[in-house]
């Protein structure tokens, strides 16, 4: 079973927005891909196990939680490393740059 998480809005880091103007891009995640999202100010990396095209949602395991200072955490709020989560495409975010 997966854990329900209220993901942060990706804002300018939105994967959906980044690829919206490129008709040749296919940002659809595949099994084994690592995708990112934001949660309570942290960057979260998820190892994709499956993708549901009908509702544009990835299901996968949390493999890293990284705070704004670049420290890796075992948990943040309700989210723990190893949790299985659902991540809608509109909540996916590109990785922050080291300056962020």
Image (tube, helix red, strand yellow):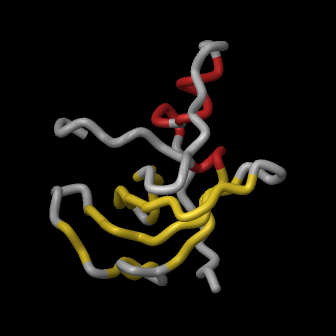
> In the rendering, at what x and y percent does residue 26 appear?
60, 28
Vertical relation: 89 (above or below) 79: above
Q: Nearer the viewer, residue 69 or 88?
A: 88
Residue 70 lies in quadrant:
bottom left
Q: How many marks?
A: 0
On screen, residue 79 versus residue 30, left or right, reads left
Q: Residue furthest front?
A: 31
Quadrant holding the N terminus = bottom right
Vertical relation: 79 (above or below) 62: below
Residue 46 lies in quadrant:
bottom left
Q: Report the residue at 39% width, 80% height from top.
A: 82
Q: Report the residue at 53% width, 35% height from top.
A: 15
Quadrant holding the C terminus = top left
Q: Nearer the viewer, residue 46 or 65?
A: 46
Residue 86 lies in quadrant:
bottom right
On screen, residue 64 versus residue 5, left or right, reads left
> In the rendering, at what x and y percent does residue 49 appear?
54, 64
> In the rendering, at what x and y percent does residue 31 appear?
52, 55
Q: Report the residue at 24% width, 74% height from top.
A: 73
Q: Report the residue at 35% width, 56% height from top.
A: 43
Vertical relation: 44 (above or below) 62: above
> In the rendering, at what x and y percent does residue 19 appear?
57, 23
């Amino acid at each position: 079973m997966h854990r329900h998480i209220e993901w942060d809005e990706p804002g300018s880091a939105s994967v959906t927005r980044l690829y919206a103007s490129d008709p040749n891009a296919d940002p659809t995640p595949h099994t084994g891909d690592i995708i990112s999202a934001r949660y309570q100010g942290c960057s979260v990396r998820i190892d994709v196990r499956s993708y549901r095209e009908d509702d544009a949602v990835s299901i996968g395991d949390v493999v890293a939680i990284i705070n704004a200072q670049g420290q890796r955490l075992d948990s943040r709020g309700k989210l723990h490393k190893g949790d299985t989560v659902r991540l809608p495409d509109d909540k996916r975010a590109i990785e922050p740059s080291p300056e962020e």
